[in-house]
Amino acid sequence: MEHFIQTIGRNMFAIFGVMALGGAAFMIASRSAVHSVLGFLFAMLCIAGCFLSLEAEFLGMAQILVYAGGIVVLFLFVVMLVEMSKKKEKEVFQLQSRYAVVAVLLGAALFLGVFRKVLFGAASPEALVLRPELAQGLNVAGQNAQAVSRGLFADYLLPFEILSVILLVALVGAVVLAKTERV
Amino acid sequence: MPIPTLTQSIVITLIQCLLVVIFVFVVVPLTVFAERKVLGYLQQRLGSTRVASGHIGITGWMNRGMWKWGRIPVLSYWRGIPGLVADVLKLILKEDIIPAKADKFVFFIAPALSMVAAVVVFAAVSFVPGVFFTFPTWFPFVGGLPVSGGIADINVGLLWILGVASVGVYGIVLAGWASNSKYPLLGGLRSAAQMVSYEVPLALSLLAPVVLSSSLNFAEMSKVMATGLPFWGLVPQIIGFLLYLTCGFAETNRLPFDMPEAENELVAGFHTEYSGMKFGFFYLAEYINMTVVAALAAGFFLGGPWLLPFGLQGLVNPYLPGFLSWFGEPHAIFFVVKIIFLLFTYIWVRGTIPRYRYDQVMSVAWKYLIPLTLFNLLLAAAVRCFAV
């Protein structure tokens, strides 16, 4: 019994990973848009489980809070509000296999290009940290939130702020685009 | 102290889960009963006093018994309590109707999502810091092992609570969509917009305790909030408590914010098409959500397992005489009493304040609550910066 549970505990990442892939497959394969959103939700929750099994508790919780609790709800809103007839839904969601295959191949190629070194290269001898003196005395497994905030507000402050400016630009752009119709 | 093996710790966790579920399923039906009675007395009537249907048979016998209880001062308040059993039986035994054009799978999964999201929040709630009780050594398999006061002592417990609570929206939205009917869809969309809006001030009002206690762990936060704050910590605590409670009312869809089931406009909102135990799950989830919000308010603002609210305990404790030291220590009973008081407050407010209009609900969230919570966050930061 003890041995069995330990084996499960060691393979938690693989279990959640397979479940996430299952959710993603359900999302692609299902015929109704709302079912797709449900599959996406399941995949997001399983990815949060993956983060948890790697002791990255903060990332796991942020995954649930942001993706499962925020973004997927917005997806659901849009899907529910844009009510389509069965025929239209079929045209939009089910007769695009050719383009989808091309898009998937393109995405896979890009992914491999970016992550080739990570996937197949030798493991880096030490973690990439710009200012290691800031991380001293920090127990990353026990103080997840502190470690992430060190990264965001000390090591990578400038990229982080630029990223938020980009988000702000997108937000303002969305408001402008939505407003012009009424004027 | 013996170190538990993995299997033993899993068994202990299961026992903790069982205890929490028992707690929830004792508190929730009593809240339903209290709602009837307290609302009744607030409106100068008696509330439920008997079981429906009957001068004959077992119900007649019970009704005659309860009639006699009416003359006894305290027991007369408890007359209708067998009606609870009747309610549960009715929910379980009633025919489960699924509309013909409904989406079967989503219709089935929506109440389950609501219920699970409501119960799972308790994983991060710590009822008492440290060890709750220790199993006696004769106990099989887990004898002599301590049981801690919370199920999972994770260092980002607050994020867990907020995250899982935000998953609870799905139950309502999906129920509204899957019913394939006009009123539930409108009710579901309304309540989703309401809950998504109120999540912002809810999270912001909980950030004040985070700033004051510099932790995200429930047990640690409630400890610092109850005993480790300077005198000026009182101000952001009291304001934060009122703001959090307001957002909590809206988040659990209770009056005065019960837009999703505004019955004069939307029949019964998102659960119009639900019947039987599926409706029962929504009903249960609403009351469990109330308990969750009450538990968080009690834990963060009313001192949790310590006796005095708003951090007064830390100010009083140094002057506490020795024979009263029991009141200076954390006990689970204080926590439970606070939860029950807050549940009473829910009913009290329901009997007192009429419902908001929908646009008023939204403007309360975006125009008043969010600026107020930001202001409170600023206050908390000032206390943290200058007064510690």
Image (spheres, rainbow, N blue to C red):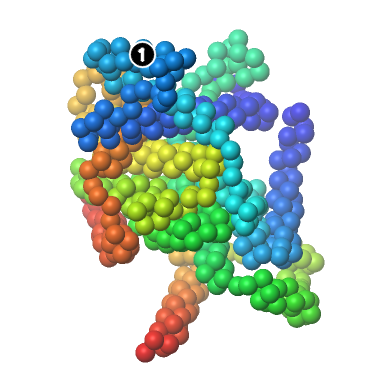
Count of picture labels: 1
As rendered, which of A132 and B235 lies closer to the eye? B235
Q: Is residue B82 above or below residue B343?
A: above
Spot occupied by residue B91 in the image (x, y as percentages of width and height)? 52, 34
Q: Amino acid at mark 1?
A: Arg
Q: Identify the image quadrant of the N terminus of chain A.
A: top right
The residue positioned 52% from the left and 28% from the top of the image is B89
Q: Identify the image quadrant of the C terminus of chain A.
A: bottom left
Spot occupied by residue A162 in the image (x, y as percentages of width and height)? 47, 77
Q: Is residue B344 visible?
A: yes
Residue B345 relative to residue B62: left or right:
left
The residue positioned 63% from the left and 72% from the top of the image is A85
Chain to which the residue tagged by mark 1 belongs: B
The residue positioned 52% from the left and 59% from the top of the image is B181
Residue A91 relative to residue B182: left or right:
right
As rendered, which of B386 and B331 lies closer to the eye? B331
SS at badge 1? helix
As rendered, which of A83 and B123 lies closer to the eye? A83
The residue positioned 64% from the left and 14% from the top of the image is B140
Badge 1 crowding class, 10 Å Cα cut-off, few under 14, some 14 to 19, many 20 or more, is some
Spot occupied by residue B104 in the image (x, y as percentages of width and height)? 65, 52
Spot occupied by residue B261 in the image (x, y as percentages of width and height)? 40, 51
Q: Which residue is mark 1?
A: B64
Q: Is residue B226 visible?
A: no
